[in-house]
Image: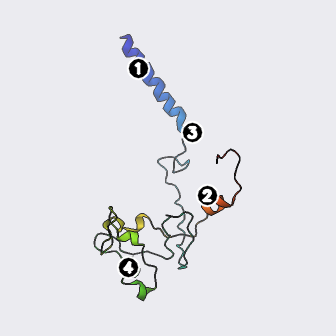
């Protein structure tokens, strides 16, 4: 009987702790109550400049410098390849996809696009004109190499 009472008291304390912490919770939806609909974030236009951006690190996938609204990229078709495939770049003047996209997981070259690289949007994304949400403190490797060596770095 005492054990049952102790369990009941523990459950009561735990439930009170949940209600006490409710005000401190900072969810992705902000401080809007669960049953209240929040105002959606604005949709910013996609950049459509067809200018290549510089990359911050050697293996960074390039961003898409144009709109891709209504581009079909699914099991039936890949609209990106209508401009970026080896056979179409001379006509479209678009950059050809990397040769790594024609390699299988063992490093063997294929005649067609590798199935594991077929869905372009897994790595490549268009850019918008949205304001920066989080301050970027990333330092490019070239900038790091230009900085003077710090003491205690060894070597």
Query: Seen from this angle, which residue lies furthest left?
Result: 76
Label 1 neighbourhood size at 10 Å, few (<14), some (14-19), many (20+)?
A: few
Query: Is disc 2 placed on a helix, strand or loop?
Result: loop
Number of marks in picture: 4
Q: Position of residue 121 (x, y in %)?
A: 41, 67
Q: Name the residue under label 4.
A: 85
Q: What distance separates the C-alpha of mark 3 from that of mark 4?
A: 52 Å
Q: Name the residue under label 2.
A: 138
Which image quarter: residue 148? bottom right
In the depicted view, which residue is nearer to us: 28 or 37?
Answer: 28
Contact between marks 2 and 1 (CB within 8 A): the answer is no
Q: What distance separates the C-alpha of mark 2 from that of mark 3?
A: 30 Å
Query: Is disc 1 placed on a helix, strand or loop?
Result: helix
Q: Looking at the image, tell me whether mark 1 or mark 4 is earlier in sequence order.
A: 1
Q: Mark 1 points at which residue?
A: 8
Query: Is disc 3 placed on a helix, strand or loop?
Result: helix
Q: What distance separates the C-alpha of mark 2 from that of mark 1?
A: 51 Å
Which image quarter: residue 51? bottom right
Query: Seen from this angle, which residue lies furthest bottom?
Result: 91
Q: Looking at the image, tell me whether mark 3 or mark 4 is earlier in sequence order.
A: 3
Q: Residue at x 54, y 32 (%)?
A: 20
In the depicted view, which residue is nearer to us: 79 or 29?
Answer: 79
Q: Name the residue under label 3.
A: 24
Q: Position of residue 38 (x, y in %)?
A: 52, 55
Q: What distance separates the C-alpha of mark 1 from that of mark 4?
A: 67 Å
Contact between marks 1 and 4 (CB within 8 A): the answer is no
Q: Looking at the image, tell me whether mark 2 or mark 3 is earlier in sequence order.
A: 3
């Amino acid at each position: 009987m005492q054990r049952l009472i102790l369990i009941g008291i523990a459950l009561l304390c735990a439930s009170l702790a949940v209600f006490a912490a409710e005000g401190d919770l900072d969810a992705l939806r902000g401080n809007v109550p669960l049953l209240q609909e929040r105002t959606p974030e604005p949709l910013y236009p996609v950049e459509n400049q067809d200018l290549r951006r510089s990359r911050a690190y050697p293996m960074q996938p390039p961003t898409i410098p144009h709109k891709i609204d209504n581009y079909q990229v699914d099991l039936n078709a890949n609209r990106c390849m209508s401009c970026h495939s080896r056979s179409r770049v001379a006509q479209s003047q678009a950059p050809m996809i990397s040769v790594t996209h024609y390699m299988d997981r063992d490093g063997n070259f294929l005649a067609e696009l590798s199935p594991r690289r077929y869905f372009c949007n897994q790595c490549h994304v268009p850019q918008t004109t949205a304001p920066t949400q989080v301050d970027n403190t990333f330092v490019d490797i070239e900038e790091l190499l230009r900085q003077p060596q710090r003491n205690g770095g060894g070597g």
